[in-house]
Amino acid sequence: MTDNSRMPFGKYKGVEMKEVPAEYLLELLRTGYKGKVKPHVVSSVLSYIKGMYDVLEVESSQFFPIPEVNEDDLIEVDNSIDFDIFEQE
């Protein structure tokens, strides 16, 4: 199975593997697929997911949630610094 292969089952059946959301594939790896599909087909998809795990992990927003920002944590920027002195001629 490659990135250009079509997902053979489930919600994204017929979609190229590279277009199936990372969250969906990772969830499939965690829970397995309970539908009526031949075991070798499921195994092929799970092998693909395992091979792409590092990439999927990075793509998945669940591993990199957007942090909440507290206004108390913000700092004021000193705009009086003249950064032109750092420019090279």
Image (spheres, rainbow, N blue to C red):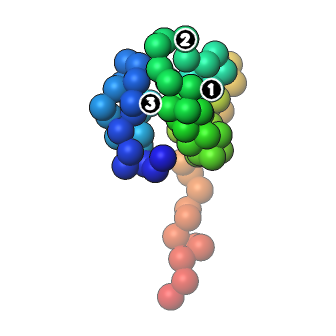
Mark sitting on residue 29:
1
Closer to the eye: label 2 or 3? 2
In the image, what residue type sits under mark 2? Answer: Lys
Q: CA distance from mark 2 to mark 3?
A: 19 Å
Secondary structure under the numbered disc 1 in the rendered image: helix
Question: Mark 1 and 2 residues: CB-CB less than 8 Å, in contact?
Answer: no
Closer to the eye: label 1 or 2? 2
Residue 89 percent across, percent down from the top left: 50, 88
Secondary structure under the numbered disc 2 in the rendered image: loop
- Label whose residue precedes the other's in the sequence (1 or 3): 3
Q: Residues within 10 Å of mark 1 (few under 14, many from 20)?
A: some
Q: Residue at x 63, y 16 (%)?
A: 31
Mark sitting on residue 6:
none
On screen, residue 2 versus residue 44, left or right, reads left
- Label whose residue precedes the other's in the sequence (1 or 2): 1
Closer to the eye: label 1 or 3? 1
Mark sitting on residue 21:
3
Q: Is residue 69 visible?
A: no
Provide the residue designation for mark 2.
34
Closer to the camera, 11 or 23? Answer: 11
